[in-house]
Amino acid sequence: MKDYFGYQGKTVVVTGAASGMGKATTEMLVDLGANVYALDWNEVKVEGIKEYVHVDLSQKESIDQVFKALPMHIDSFFGIAGISGSNNDFVTTVTVDLIANKYISETYLIERMKEGGSIAFMTSTGGNGWEREDNKSVYHDLLTADSWESTVKELEKTGFTQLPGTLGYPFAKLAMNYYTILMQATFASKGIRVNSVLPGATDTGMKDEFENMAGGEAALLSNNGYSHTLAKSEEMAYPIVFLNSDMASYISGELLRVDYANTAEQVAGIRKVERVLSLVGIKQMMMGQH
Ligand SMILES: NC(=O)c1ccc[n+]([C@@H]2O[C@H](COP(=O)([O-])OP(=O)(O)OC[C@H]3O[C@@H](n4cnc5c(N)ncnc54)[C@H](O)[C@@H]3O)[C@@H](O)[C@H]2O)c1
């Protein structure tokens, strides 16, 4: 059978490979014949991977150390690791969910990928509304900063860093959705595609934290349109494996919402918009409470 996906013998890097969507993605890529470098804070137990690589994505030094040891040529990158912010402060949450992806892309992927390469991130429908002008104005400068240090400095300038980690999560996901579009322009000049998958609520290692944050399972399920169950990890792995494959060779700058039509119906005006995230509004509200 023809290898339509085109992963056979390719060098791919997956972050967050120890659990949930990242693990499911790693398993599929191994099945499709890729050489998978599986990055995570925790050990990755997937048979057939090329190598498990320990990394702490909240630390620039750890990322630098890891990339010293990774191959000089990478075909596809899957930025899947993330934290909910329930157990971390705002800056750490934004660092893992956003700054690490930005740093890896601009420092290493731009050098190590060539024409035909592909990058895909697991962002979130929690980052819906990223295109609002008031939201973009909050994170535009940090997304266009040119180093790890200046990105952190720009993050501090936003005035958000004292807020709880759980608000770092939507902040990072809003910014990642915008970043996907900004970054595809840079990578397009090298013939490299950049896309994101925006999951609805999914049954992974993060489920309990999201359930607490949402206020129960029913509230969490309201993010999933007509589906009456949470998505399974592999239901997010399928679309991200597709987006980085040869089957998606003309797709770039796509923010693929995988939430059983929840967002689409909100945009169409036939489903109630549960909440419109305005970062400026959130900050004013939070500051008012202190
Ligand atoms: N589960 C959901 O409902 C949901 C919804 C929307 C988006 N997402 C996003 O999906 C992605 C995958 O998460 P998941 O739901 O599979 O959760 P998960 O907790 O099962 O997997 C996350 C993985 O990231 C790793 N990780 C966390 N911090 C790290 C660090 N500092 N360094 C290295 N590795 C680290 C964890 O060890 C874990 O293996 C995340 O970016 C998450 O924000 C999840």
Image (cartoon, rainbow, N blue to C red):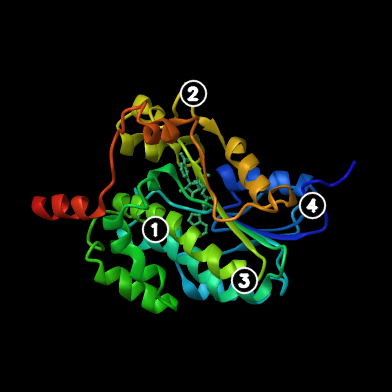
**Residue 227 placement (x, y as % from top left):** 49, 23
Query: Closest to the observer: 144 or 232?
Result: 144
Label 3: few (<14), some (14–19) or many (≥20) C-alpha neighbours in 10 Å: few
Q: Which residue in the structure is indicated by mark 4?
A: 6
Name the residue type under label 2: Ser
Point 59% across, 48% down: residue? 22
Helix, strand or loop at mark 1: helix
Q: Which residue in the structure is indicated by mark 1?
A: 175
> Could you give the CA–CA distance between mark 3 and mark 1, rounded to whole angstroms?
22 Å
Location of residue 77 (image quadrant): bottom right
Q: Which comes sooner in the sequence, label 3 or label 4?
A: 4
The image quadrant where one finds the C terminus is: bottom left
The image quadrant where one finds the N terminus is: top right
For the residues carrying marks 3 and 1, which lies nearer the camera in this image? 3
Helix, strand or loop at mark 3: loop
Q: Which comes sooner in the sequence, label 3 or label 1?
A: 1
Point 67% across, 45% down: residue? 242
Q: Is mark 3 within 8 Å of ligand 1?
A: no
Q: Which residue in the structure is indicated by mark 2?
A: 227
Q: Which residue in the structure is indicated by mark 3?
A: 189
Q: Which comes sooner in the sequence, label 1 or label 4?
A: 4
Point 61% across, 73% down: residue? 110
Q: Is residue 278 above or below residue 185?
A: above
